[in-house]
Amino acid sequence: MQIETSKIQLVKTILDSEDEEFISRLVDFVKNETDDFWPELTAEQQEDLKKGIAQLDQGKRKSYREVTDRLGN
């Protein structure tokens, strides 16, 4: 399905709804998705994320399984 079609269907669903709770949950979801969490992170958390992104950019990746095996999970 193309993104344009999905957007139109989503808007139609919203416009057709009279469910206040549904609309409220959507508003909350959109608000939470657009809030920038970066300023809320500590300097250490920001540095860890920057380091992780740099490692990914360098092709240094580990699968989920490798990580969980290392952690003993």
Image (spheres, grey):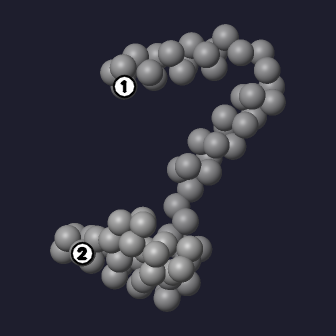
Secondary element at image label 1: helix
Q: Is residue 44 above or below residue 6?
A: below
Secondary element at image label 2: loop
Dot 2 crowding, Cα within 10 Å, few <14, some 14–19, many 20+: few
Q: Is residue 42 left or right of residue 60?
A: right
Quarter of the image where one finds residue 2: top left
Q: Which of 44 and 67 lies nearest the eye of the viewer?
A: 67
Q: Is residue 55 above or below residue 5?
A: below
Quarter of the image where one finds residue 65: bottom left
Residue 14 percent coordinates (x, y): 63, 20
Identified by mark 1, the residue type is Ile
Q: Earlier in the sequence, mark 1 or mark 2?
A: 1
Q: Which of 56 and 44 lies nearest the eye of the viewer?
A: 56
Identified by mark 2, the residue type is Lys
Q: Is residue 45 left or right of residue 47?
A: right
What residue did someone put label 2 on? 60
Residue 39 percent coordinates (x, y): 53, 73
Query: For residue 3, which numbered disc appears in the image?
Result: 1
